[in-house]
Amino acid sequence: MLTFNMDLLFNFPLWASLAAIFFAQFIKVPIQFIASRELNWSLLTSTGGMPSSHSAAVTALATGVALETGLDSPTFAVAAIFAIITMFDATGVRRQAGEQAIVLNQLMSDFHKFVEEAKGWQKKPEQVKRKELKELLGHKPIEVFFGGLSGIILTLVLYFIMYS
C-alpha cells in the first residue's frame, strides 16, 4: 500500500526542479514581450522558447542532487546523464520535429488553397480544414544553454537561502 511520506516535502532536488520549471515558463512571457512587444500569456504552458524549461528542470535536478549527495555519488551521475540526454534531445530530435512541422504546415496551407475549389470543401468545419502541427517543439542551442544556466543558478540561490 502506498503511503504519503513527509520526506517528500523536504526533497530539495525535487522542489528546486519544480521551481526551475515555473521560473523558466514564467520568464518566457517578459522575454517575448521585450523581443516582440506582444504580451503572450500562452507561453506559460507552451513548449519551446527562451529559456528552455526542460533544461532548467534537469540542471536544477542535477545541481540539487550534487549539493545533497556530492559530485562523486552515483545518484548525481544518473541526474547528470539524464540532464545531458534531455538537453541534447531538446536541440536535436525535438527541434528537427519543429522544423518539419513548419514545412508540413506550409504544405497543408498550399494544399488547402488548391482544394478550395473542390466540391464540398467549403462545407467542412474550419477546424478540420486548418489543423496545424505544433512548430515550437524544440529549442535553439542558446535557449537550452540559458535554460540550463537558469536551473543551476536558481538551485544554488535556493540552496543557500534554505541552508545558510
Image (cartoon, grey):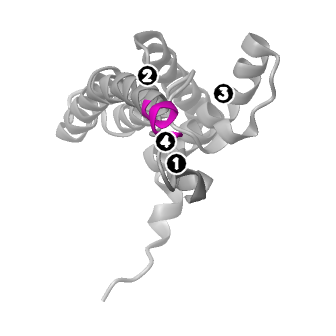
Marking on residue 129:
1
Q: Nearer the viewer, residue 58 or 105?
A: 105
SS class, disc 1: helix
Residue placed at 40% from the left, 33% from the top? 67
Check disc 2 and report its element: helix, strand or loop: loop
Residue, disc 2: 139
Q: Which residue is mark 4?
A: 17
Q: Please tell me whether residue 138 is drawn above or below residue 42 in the rendered image.
A: above
Location of residue 7 in the rendering, given as x and y in whole percent from the top left corner: 45, 64
Q: What is the CA distance from the residue labelled 2 to the residue labelled 1?
A: 28 Å
Horizontal relation, residue 41 to residue 93: left or right: right
Mark 2 neighbour class, 10 Å CA radius: few under 14, some 14 to 19, many 20 or more: many
For marks 2 and 1, the one nearer the N-term is: 1
Residue that appears at 40% across and 12% down? 141
Please indicate whether residue 30 sits to the left or right of residue 123 in the image.
right
Q: Which residue is mark 3?
A: 28
Q: Position of residue 162 (x, y in %)?
A: 62, 40
Amino acid found under the numbered disc labelled 1 = Lys
Mark 4 or mark 3, which has the lower sequence index? Answer: 4
Q: Secondary structure at mark 3?
A: helix
- Label pair 1/4, CB-CB below 8 angstroms: no
Q: CA distance from mark 1 to mark 4?
A: 40 Å
The quarter holding residue 82 reads: top left
Q: Are marks 1 and 3 in contact (CB under 8 Å)?
A: no
**Rendering coords of residue 27 (x, y %):** 69, 28
Q: Residue at x 38, y 39 (%)?
A: 68
Q: Residues within 10 Å of mark 3 (few under 14, many from 20)?
A: many
